[in-house]
Image (spheres, grey):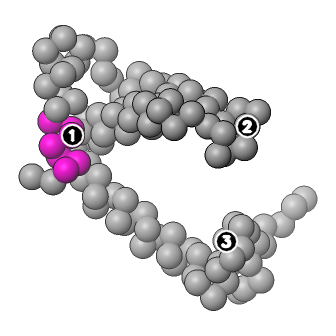
Amino acid sequence: MSDIQAITQALLQFRNERDWEQFHNPKDLATGLSIEASELLECFLWKIAEEADLDKVREELADVFAYAFLIADHYRLDVSQIVTDKIAKNAAKYPVDKAKGSAKKYTEYDSPSYPKPSHQ
């Protein structure tokens, strides 16, 4: 069993012991994830990154992961596989020779493979 599977099983056990599955539909899990991501972002509000309270960042990041893992479990998605697939997709969109050291979106590259969108 992978670490992700073990964490997911612990989350499910915690949830099920409290009879909270009834509240864990995908919409509400996604809403919870968004709220927790906002709380993570709040750790950095009006600060430079180094001033953020690491304990608070750790706590909010754990909440983000928990909701994400529960959503993945609901849809029977393999977290390792979907992240690996996304890395491969992004590698195709952001080739090293064009993306290295750049914050540009792939649609901004000067390349026939990535035409610039027309703004009308």
Q: Is residue 43 left or right of residue 74?
A: right
**Would you name the residue on which mark 1 appears?**
7
> What x and y, as percent, mark residue 95?
57, 82
Identify the mark at residue 106; answer none if there is no mark.
3
Badge 1 vs badge 3, beta-carbon distance below 8 Å:
no
Amino acid type, callout 1: Ile
Q: Secondary structure at mark 2?
A: loop
Q: Please, is residue 22 above or below residue 71 in the view? A: above
Place residue 43 in its image quadrant. top right
Say which of marks 3 and 2 sits in front: 2
- Name the one closer to the observer, 5 or 90: 5
Q: In the figure, residue 81 lies in which quadrant?
A: bottom left
Disc 3 residue type (three-letter): Tyr
| Circle nearer the N terminus (1, 3) | 1
> For the residues marked 1 and 3, what is the alpha-carbon distance in whole angstroms?
34 Å
Does residue 27 appear in the picture of this structure? no
Q: Residue at x 29, y 34 (%)?
A: 70
Residue visible at 18% across and 22% down?
Answer: 14
Q: Is residue 98 visible?
A: yes
x%, y% of residue 54? 51, 37
Vertically, is 117 above or below 101? above
**Residue pictured at 63% horizontal, 88% vertical:** 97
State how far apart marks 3 and 2 are (Cα): 30 Å
Does the magenta portion include 90? no
